[in-house]
Image (cartoon, rainbow, N blue to C red):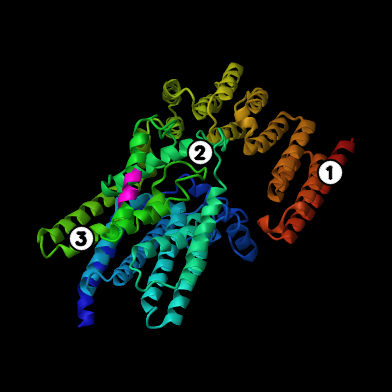
Amino acid sequence: MRSASIATPSLCYFLILIAAYFVYSPGMSGGFLFDDYPNLQHLGDLGGVVDWETFRAYVFSGFAGPTGRPLALVTFLLDDNAWPSQAPWFKQTNLLIHVLCGLLLCWATLLLLRNLKRVGEKQAQYIAVLACALWVLHPYMVSTILYVVQRMAQLATLFCLAGVVMYLYGRLQLSMRPRRAYIFMSLGLVAGTFLATFSKENGALLPLLVLVIEFCLPREGRPAWQWRALFLWLPSLAVAALLARYIDFSDNPWPNRNFNQIERLLTEARIVCEYLLHLFVPRIEGNGLYQDGYVISKGLFEPVSTFFAIAFLVALLAVTFAIRKKAPLISLGLLFFFASHLMESTVVGLELYFEHRNHLASLFLFLPLAYYCVIYSARFKLLPALAVVVLGILASMTWLRASLWSDNDKLEFYWVQSATNSPRAINALAAHYLNNGDYEKANEYLLAASRRLPQSSLLTARLLLQKVWVGQASEQDFIQAGERLKLQEFDAQTVKGIRTLVERVTGGDAASNSLDYAHYSLNLLDTMESSPAYGEFPLFMRLVAYLRAQLYLHIGDAAEAYRYYSQAISRYQEADAALAMVAEMGSAGYPEKALELLEQATQVLAQQDSRKLKRSRMSYEQDIAYLEGALREAMKTKNTATEAP
């Protein structure tokens, strides 16, 4: 009888999994995007991940967060061990993880309802399947699954769900097998938090999320207060204390952002409201990854929607606490949502808006809808049909969105048309025009956008780069760009654009007047360095020395190139960067100067913490020995050629 009772819900869930695979299948053919490249290109740094040395170098090369997210990086090896690679391989794995998350969500929901003890087993099974379906088939999840690097967010969700499942299962066992129950709950919290955090840092919120669940469950069956204090309260307070350290209401806490902390908090109130809107009133596609044009709240009434957003969130929280006993699932879904956003939507200086931040946050948001749909289905006969229609609409929207994600060019062009105030979107479309040989159109488009967004330094850098690219830049263009950059808002992407410009000037395919461009570029860097915005940005200050070294090397001024390479090595304090600079100097035909830089690189290696090295110290020492031998041999060859009659 029991197996028969679960047959129908199990069949429904099986059909949902098939539907999920089908609706996401068009997007499997899409390519890599944006952050995929810097996060995955390390797969090929040392000729591929083929042994322990290269495995260690790759896994601990992460920079996406404070932990480096090594566990997430390990999972990319399931798809390939080299770079460049094929995006569909990675997307298939992402889809499998999403389906696995759906399975755990269904299980967690069923265990949650058993702990709540308000519905029978059969109803609980249908509620769990419906809640899972609403989440798995929702179009808002597409950007997390089909944006390869967001596997990090998926894995954080996966391990948090695993921890929740083990906790809820153990909680059910407390009255019968307390020892077994505490082992399950403790293991779930410790292992789940550890694995989730080293996939993405918001996984550290797992104890707080379980605390939210416990807050909404009946007191009956609750673990002992000593256990809760140790495994739930203390970790939650530790995360709160860590976040409190980020509080900084100064005018410019983040030189690499165009907003301060107060502005971020005000803006996030509007963004969180927008997340909720699009979760309950979904759309096929929005601005995608071009969110840098999002209007920043400069004050409580600037724009006025900031005030109404804050008022709405405060009222929603008040209602959530007020109805906790009468409608615990509504409280749980909303409190879980807010708690999940504590790390990414408050005081940490991250970018403002990303859909993937809701992959974890929205887990139980649709549970109340599923709950009331199932328990009132006997009274209102149309509810099951309505649920099927809603799932069909969600699946259709997800399929359409996944289809758009199947073609990178079409996808980015759609985003550009939607994100009219995004300098990064404008930059991308200008690049598209230029790559297709339509320089005049790219130029006109950028000029018009620059007049509309006069504070965008990225557009200024892009306009100069385009002129350099086709060999039409004048000295006056460099001077005007420098003067504008001094007065415009800082954008980290602008620094990347300037680096691309220098690479173009010093590259083998540079224009015939590249020596002039090199001198103009040096003056441009001087102007940017005199600006407080760039002069206070550590990444630019160490990069500018390196760029100057490359430019002087291109000009043929070995003494100045050596001086700035030495300065860059001192500022980077990284063995890999130092050895790369030594190789550049040696390859340019200056082995004597390269040997002097090698001595400095050796000192950097000796002082660098072994935990921050990408390879073993012995491997670096072997590279240094090889470089020294090659450079000395190059010196002998050079001297012999000089002495020959």
The CA span between labels 2 and 1 is: 54 Å
Q: In this view, does 595 lie above or below 322?
A: above
Q: Where is residue 343 in the image (x, y as percent from the top left)?
A: 48, 50
Q: Is residue 645 magenta?
A: no
Q: Position of residue 371 (x, y in %)?
A: 23, 62
Which residue does the numbered mark 1 point to in the structure image?
635
Magenta range is: 313-319
Q: In this view, does 373 lie to the left or right of 382?
A: right
Which residue does the numbered mark 3 point to in the structure image?
372
Density class for disc 1 (Cα within 10 Å; few <14, some 14-19, many ≥20) is: some
Residue ID at (40%, 62%): 97
Which residue does the numbered mark 2 point to in the structure image?
261
Residue ID at (26%, 67%): 13
The kind of residue on which mark 1 rests is Met
Q: In this view, does 252 lie to the left or right of 620?
A: left
Q: What element carries label 2?
A: helix
Q: Position of residue 347 (x, y in %)?
A: 50, 44
Lower position in the chain sequence, tag 2 or tag 3: 2
Q: In this view, does 340 lie to the left or right of 382?
A: right
Q: Nearer the viewer, mark 2 or mark 1?
A: 2
Question: Which residue is more in the foreground, 138 or 357?
Answer: 357
